Each structure stands twice: as structure tokens, then as C-alpha cells.
Image: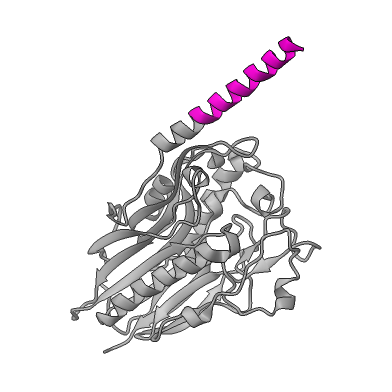
Amino acid sequence: MKKLFKILGSILLTLVLCFGALVGYLMATEYKPQDVEVLTLQNTIKQQSESVQIDKEYTALDWNIGYAGLDKDEDFFMDGGKMVLPLDKAHVEENIKNITQIIKDENADVTLLQEVDEDSKRSYNINQVSYLDKELGLNSILAYNFKVKYIPYPWPTLGKVNSGIYTATKYNIDRAERYQMPIPFTFPEKLANLKRGFSVIYSKVENSDKQLVIINAHFDAYDKENKGKIAQTKQLVEFVQKEYKKGNYVLVGADFNQSLKTLSKEEINKVPEELWRAENFDKSLIPEGFKLVYDESKNSARLNNKPYVSGSEGTYGFIIDGYMVSDNIEVVSVETLGQDYRYSDHNPVRLKYKLKQK
């Protein structure tokens, strides 16, 4: 019996030491972004950058590309599915190729992408940022949202993740910054979790002392009781108000991870309680001079509880992707493109807009 206790004690001690070593490693390598950081501009534009003009029609494209690993054939363990990693590297390669081609075909003046991987196990370490830069040939920035050396769960483990929000534009960029958003996770969970921020690019408006301020954001999904999303929304609202009061034009493109279309309790409850649900965006938080802009006619995202088959039982969709714009920007049209989740668990949302004359 003593021998058994010694063996069990040794196993327990080994497990404690391994856990301690893991926590120590994660603490030593933890990503600790500053509240405000200057972002490096990648000048990959193959043609002369454009100045922003009043009363000219422009196009924006907002798209969470799901690290090119959440196409129609995939599910995901955090959404009630079983898969941790995409089916294979070929799926990811094909997805990023097709996603990029769609972006090129859209030829938007500004493209706002979320969940773009730079070097992550979950996307087979394909550098999607470099690929997009090369193929699009635009001015671009990347702001990290997820930068962890090793995520030790579930099984197989997620491992290393370097991922963020990517903005590419034809516009001249005067400066670009990242603003850290409230983190809803506590120790030790936060060591291997997302640390979301929103990115901002400033472009001078021609024949004006004002700027077009374009913000790319991706709000928390798996925060408890939506506390993270609410805190992040309040921070963003405060920021856009400050820019608007300067007389600037402000455009936010985001995966809000909240239903932009107000749903009844019955509509929300169509999704089983044990699965992820999109709670309503609190529209009382929208500041004066701003409005949410989204396509009410089509879902922009699906739940990854199972591979996607249109109209099948247990398939759930949400309207969580869109824009927030200041009232000095005229919205010409907004449309969620019918990609049917072929290459991502989100569909892209196209906005056509003009800057109004003061």
C-alpha cells in the first residue's frame, strides 16, 4: 500500500510541476500590448495611393475570414462541434486563395478583415498576412488580437496562435494605431486567450482639414454574460465620439458578435441554450450622430456546431457583421454577399458610401 501511495504521490507531484512549468512559460511569454500602439504600415500598393474625396462613391468590404479554416465542411469545438483544427492544410490553402480572389473581384477601396492568421498551428502556419499583401498589393496594417506561444487545450491542442485584424486600402494612410480593448478574462485563463484591440487608420480628406477615420474591430465571442462585449462597445463608442467631435468622418467595420437586428426572446431561444447565441446589440449605446448599418435580409454568420448544409436541421445563422457610421457619411447601400459560407463561417458585407460636404 505504501508503495502505491508513493507512486500516486510521484504522479501527482509530476503533474503539479508540469502545470507550474506551463503556467510559468505562459507568463514569461504572455502578449502584453500597450493601451495605444503605433502600427507598422505595409506599403505594398502597386499603384499610387488615392486621396479621400468629398462626394465620391467608395466601397468598403467587411469580412471575418475565420483564419481560412472554418469553411462549410468544418465545425468547431467552441460552438458545439467536435473539430479543433481544420480538416487539412489543403482546405486552408484553397480557402485563403478563394477568399483573396473574392476580395480582388470586389475591388473595394478599403477591406476590413478579422481572424487573419500570420503564423498559427490552426491554419498550418500559413502566413495569410503576407499572402494577402502580395496578392492585393495595397497599403495594409495588422493589429494582433490573439498572440499566444502555446494554447494547451483541448486535444489536439490549439498550440501557437498569431492572429489579428487586417486592413487593406487604396487610400493614403497618414497614421495607424491599435487601441487595447477591455479583457474579460482573469488569471490564469487570460494567459492563453485573446487580447482584443481595434485598429484605426487616418486618411486626410482632400481640400479639407478633416480626416476619414476607419476602424476595424472584432468583439469577444465567448465572454461570460456578454460583459466583455458591452465594455468593448462602450470603449469604442467613446472613441468614435471623440473623433466625430473633431469634425472627422468615422466608419467602423466589425464582427460585433452581437445581433445587429433586434431579436425577440423567442427568436434568440431558437438556438439551444447549450450552444453559442448572438444576444442583441444594445442600441441605446449608439451615440448621437451615428447609426448601425447592416443587411437585414441575409445572415452574415453561421454557428459552427456542425458542417454547413443550407436549410438543414440544427443550422443557425446570425446578423452580427456590419458597420457603424457617422452621419456626415452618406450610406448608398449595404449588402451581405451570398457566399453561402463556402470559405468562411462568415459572409462578407459590402458598404457603398460617400463623404458629405460640410
What residue is drawn where x is 51% and y is 65%?
229
> Where residue 80 appears, x then y in whole percent?
71, 53
What residue is drawn where x is 45% and y is 32%?
24
Report the front residue among 246 and 106: 246
Q: What is the residue that sits farthest to the top in this orientation?
A: 3
Q: What is the residue that sits farthest to the right in this orientation?
A: 313
> Where residue 137 appears, x then y in whole percent?
35, 54
The answer to whether residue 9 of the structure is visible from this angle is yes
- Left or right: 204 in relation to 60: left
Q: Which residues are magenta?
A: 1-21
Q: Does 103 appear above or below 8?
A: below
Q: Does 122 appear above or below 107?
A: above
Report the front residue among 116 and 267: 267
> Where residue 288 appears, x then y in whole percent?
40, 86
The answer to whether residue 61 of the structure is visible from this angle is no
Where residue 197 sits, quadrant-wise, is: bottom left
Quarter the C terminus occupies: bottom left
What residue is drawn where x is 50% and y is 79%?
293
Q: What is the residue that sits farthest to the bottom in this orientation?
A: 358
- Left or right: 335 in relation to 197: right
Q: Main secondary structure of the magenta part?
A: helix
